[in-house]
Image: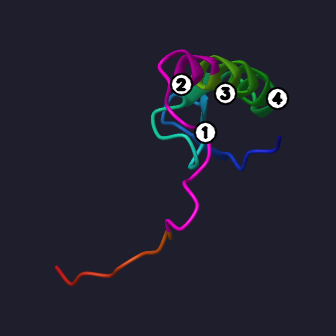
Amino acid sequence: MNFKIFLEQDEDGWYIATVPALPGCISQGKTEEEAKKNIVEAIELHLRSLAQDGVPLYQKEGRKETFVAINL
């Protein structure tokens, strides 16, 4: 299973990795490689936790994901 991740460097030089498909799944590392390695472990733990709590990993059939825009 492949997941898209985002990598950002913070003000202290650490790389922060997040997973858009898994809100709250975040990790970090001193290098990009370390952040990638750590986010893999975070994804595995996140998915195990969801499974233990009975949260489905896939969207229900017939449910549509879309976006709306607002003006502020």
- Figure check: 61 above or below 22: below
Q: Nearer the viewer, residue 17 or 56?
A: 56
Distance, label 4 to label 2, CA atoms, is 26 Å
Q: CA distance from mark 4 to mark 1?
A: 27 Å
Q: Residue at x 55, y 40 (%)?
A: 22
Q: If you read the primary sequence from the N terminus, does the residue marked by circle 1 or circle 2 appear first?
A: 2
- The residue under label 3 is 43
Q: Which residue is mark 4?
A: 33
Q: Are marks 4 and 2 in contact (CB under 8 Å)?
A: no
Q: Is residue 28 above or below residue 58?
A: above
Q: Quadrant of residue 8?
A: top right
From the viewer's perspective, tell me whether residue 69 is left or right of residue 4.
left
Residue at point 58%, 22% (across, down): 51
User: Where residue 43 sits in the image (x, y, percent)?
Assistant: 66, 27
Callout 1, which amino acid? Leu
Mark found first going from the N terminus, 4 or 2? 4
* Residue 62 painted magenta: yes
Q: Position of residue 17 (x, y in %)?
A: 62, 36
Label 2: how many residues lie within 10 Å, few (<14), some (14-19) or many (20+)? few
Mark 3 or mark 1: which comes first in sequence?
Answer: 3
Q: Are marks 4 and 3 in contact (CB under 8 Å)?
A: no
Q: CA distance from mark 4 to mark 3?
A: 15 Å
Looking at the rendered image, the disc whose residue lies closer to the viewer, 4 or 1, is 1
Query: Which residue is labeled 1 in the image?
Result: 57
Residue drawn at the location 60% of the way across and 39% of the way down: 57
- Residues at discs 1 and 2 in contact (Cβ within 8 Å): yes
Q: What is the distance, in whole Å, between disc 3 and disc 1 at their CAs?
A: 12 Å
Instruction: Mark 4 or mark 1: name the one nearer the start of the chain.
Output: 4
Q: Which mark is residue 31?
A: none
Of tags 4 and 3, which is closer to the observer? 3
